[in-house]
């Protein structure tokens, strides 16, 4: 028999888990059996199991065989994209902040054989080499309080797969699927986030694999999305009417052009680098900059960023966003170590999306626990700091360094991004004041050897189509929150009205008609 929530978790954990499950997962299961199975699957991912494979999760749930868990991932009727969208709404409510940053990046899943969807010999930063693996492209959300969580995912299918239609069919790849590069997959996720009226964010960032892609930057500019993308040292740009490259543009800057600024807190303290920036011509109505980061211990070690925003911003804000890119690595580390993101043993395209989505829900549960209760929609938490950062050193004329330090907090941290970023260096003296250590992700207890029988979900009558009673409750709760937001933020009534329309269309599709 599977253990109850209370047996594997600290006090207070159960209510948080049940609420998240009721709002994000349960509404999209019309039948009770797969709904209960999904709950057991999530509890297994959150348990202390060393390996979270189909067999181990089945044993944890009290099943003699993994057939039920495999059926949940491969054949049960439910839509992982609906769960993903509901999770994004929860992230918007619990962690949303106007200074939030979307971070796009990819990670590898090493595999054996050639039957898993998208597998082939390809480079992955996870292994640091070319190996047989799948590549997942992800989008994470990081707010200025160092809370971060994965909110979207896409499986990269190499172009070679589309030369073999039979292979696509065997892996269960939908017929309408077409080849898409990693930056194109990243844009799909950015666009979904931008289309969500409930999710607020200020920036998008990513590494050179995404920043060097001109089409991705142009799409962001076309949607008015601010970005700070890492780019290669030979990134082309135009200065004073002459074409040059990123490293050459910063080569002639004097020492006065560089300022020592922290880009966030890491495991060993603040991450200190020297930074300089150059103003570029406006493009499509956006302010444009080139940003350079220089290692303190090795001045020849440089990194470059292409930046664009709809308003003038200061250097501290660009540095904060550039530093937040490491947060996605923290998400990868946490989801793989804590909730078995890479422990799956499935081959089908749909099964990959389902496991990854449930692992994202499990990780979000831990992030929500660490963040504490959601803010009251009627409370105004804007301290004006974003406006201060926006106007400090508004735009460098030509080539100029950052002129004054912002009084705002320096935020965000994470482990070095793969092997491309140098270890952080500390300033000589005086040492900066220590910052509070953020709440760590919750570490769950190992399940007991003799668990009590589970507390089953209440049997409910399934309403029209696939929405159950929990889903009806979630929709009503969503409408109540919209009313709260309208009362608290009249200036955002346009976005909130669009959110209400989303719910209205969803209700029309899933709720029974009133007679």
Image (cartoon, grey):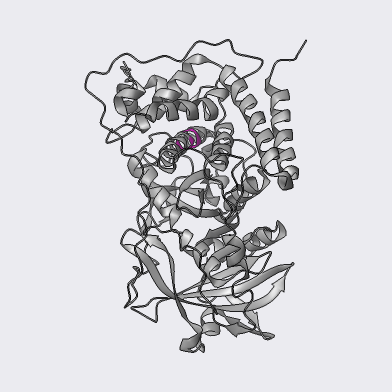
Residue 27 left/right relative to 131: right
Q: Position of residue 337 (x, y in %)?
A: 33, 43
Query: Is 356 included in the stretch rendered in magenta?
Result: yes
The stretch drawn in magenta includes residue 313: no
Up the image or down, 72 lies above or below 293; here it is above
Task: Say which of 185 and 415 sits in front.
Answer: 415
- The total number of labels drawn is 0
Q: Is residue 122 visible?
A: no
Q: Where are the magenta residues, as a range?
A: 353-357
Q: Is residue 75 left or right of residue 222?
A: left
Which of the two residues, 489 or 245, is positioned nearer the viewer here?
489
Task: Compare residues 401 and 290 and report the one nearer the observer.
Answer: 401
Above or below, comparing residue 116 to residue 261 in the picture: above
Say if 132 sits above or below 1 in the image: below
The quarter of the displayed image where residue 45 is located: top left
The residue positioned 59% from the left and 43% from the top of the image is 379
Task: Tell me what residue is drawn at x 74 percent, y 34 percent.
Answer: 501
Q: Position of residue 389 (x, y in %)?
A: 58, 66
Is 71 or 99 nearer to us in this picture? 99
Residue placed furthest toward the left: 449
Q: Main secondary structure of the magenta part?
A: helix
Q: Residue at x 51, y 84 (%)?
A: 257
Q: Position of residue 469 (x, y in %)?
A: 58, 17
Query: Could you tell me which quadrant the N terminus lies in?
Result: top left
Q: Residue at x 27, y 18 (%)?
A: 451
Q: Is residue 206 visible?
A: yes
Task: Point out residue 229 in the picture as x, y percentages from the top left corner.
Answer: 55, 64
């Amino acid at each position: 028999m599977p253990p109850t929530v209370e047996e594997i978790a600290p006090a207070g954990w159960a209510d948080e888990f049940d609420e998240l499950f009721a709002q994000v997962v349960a509404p999209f299961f019309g039948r009770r059996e797969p709904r209960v199975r999904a709950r057991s699957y999530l509890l297994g991912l959150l348990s202390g199991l060393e390996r979270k494979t189909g067999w181990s999760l089945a044993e944890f749930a009290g099943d003699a065989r993994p057939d039920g868990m495999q059926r949940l991932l491969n054949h049960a009727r439910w839509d992982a994209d609906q769960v993903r969208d509901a999770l994004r709404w929860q992230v918007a409510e619990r962690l949303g902040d106007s200074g939030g940053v979307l971070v796009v990046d990819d990670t590898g899943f090493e595999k054996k054989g050639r039957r898993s969807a998208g597998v082939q010999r390809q480079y992955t930063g996870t292994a640091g080499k070319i190996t047989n693996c799948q590549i997942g492209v992800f989008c994470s959300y990081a707010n200025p309080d160092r809370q971060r969580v994965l909110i979207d995912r896409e499986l990269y299918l190499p172009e070679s797969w589309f030369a073999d239609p039979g292979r696509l069919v065997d892996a269960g790849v939908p017929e309408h699927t077409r080849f898409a590069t990693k930056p194109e997959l990243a844009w799909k996720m950015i666009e979904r986030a931008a289309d969500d009226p409930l999710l607020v964010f200020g920036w998008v960032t990513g590494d050179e694999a995404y920043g060097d892609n001109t089409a991705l930057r142009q799409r962001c500019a076309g949607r008015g999305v601010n970005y700070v993308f890492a780019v290669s040292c030979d990134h082309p740009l135009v200065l004073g009417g002459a074409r040059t490259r990123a490293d050459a543009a910063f080569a002639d800057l004097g020492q006065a052009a560089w300022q020592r600024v922290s880009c966030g807190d890491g495991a060993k303290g603040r991450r200190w680098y020297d930074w300089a920036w150059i103003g570029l011509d406006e493009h499509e109505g956006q302010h444009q900059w080139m940003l350079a980061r220089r290692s303190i211990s090795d001045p020849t070690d440089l990194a470059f960023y292409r930046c664009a925003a709809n308003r003038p911003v200061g250097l501290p804000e660009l540095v904060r966003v550039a530093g937040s890119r490491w947060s996605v690595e923290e998400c990868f580390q946490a989801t793989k170590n804590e909730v078995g993101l890479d422990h799956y043993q499935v081959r089908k395209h749909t099964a990959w999306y389902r496991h990854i989505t449930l692992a994202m829900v499990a990780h979000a549960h831990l992030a929500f626990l660490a963040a504490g209760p959601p803010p009251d929609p009627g409370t105004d938490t804007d301290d004006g700091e974003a406006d201060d950062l926006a106007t400090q050193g508004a735009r460098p004329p030509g080539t100029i360094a950052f002129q004054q330090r912002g009084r705002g907090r320096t935020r965000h941290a994470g482990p070095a991004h793969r092997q491309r970023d140098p270890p952080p260096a500390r300033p000589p003296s005086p040492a900066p004041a220590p910052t509070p250590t953020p709440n760590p992700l919750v570490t769950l207890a190992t399940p007991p050897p003799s668990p009590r029988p589970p507390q089953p979900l209440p049997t409910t009558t399934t309403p029209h189509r696939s929405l159950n009673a929990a889903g009806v409750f979630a929709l009503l709760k969503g409408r109540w929150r919209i009313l709260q937001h309208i009362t608290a933020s009249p200036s955002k009534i346009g976005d909130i009205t669009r959110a209400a329309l989303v719910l209205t269309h969803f209700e029309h599709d899933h709720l029974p008609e009133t007679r």
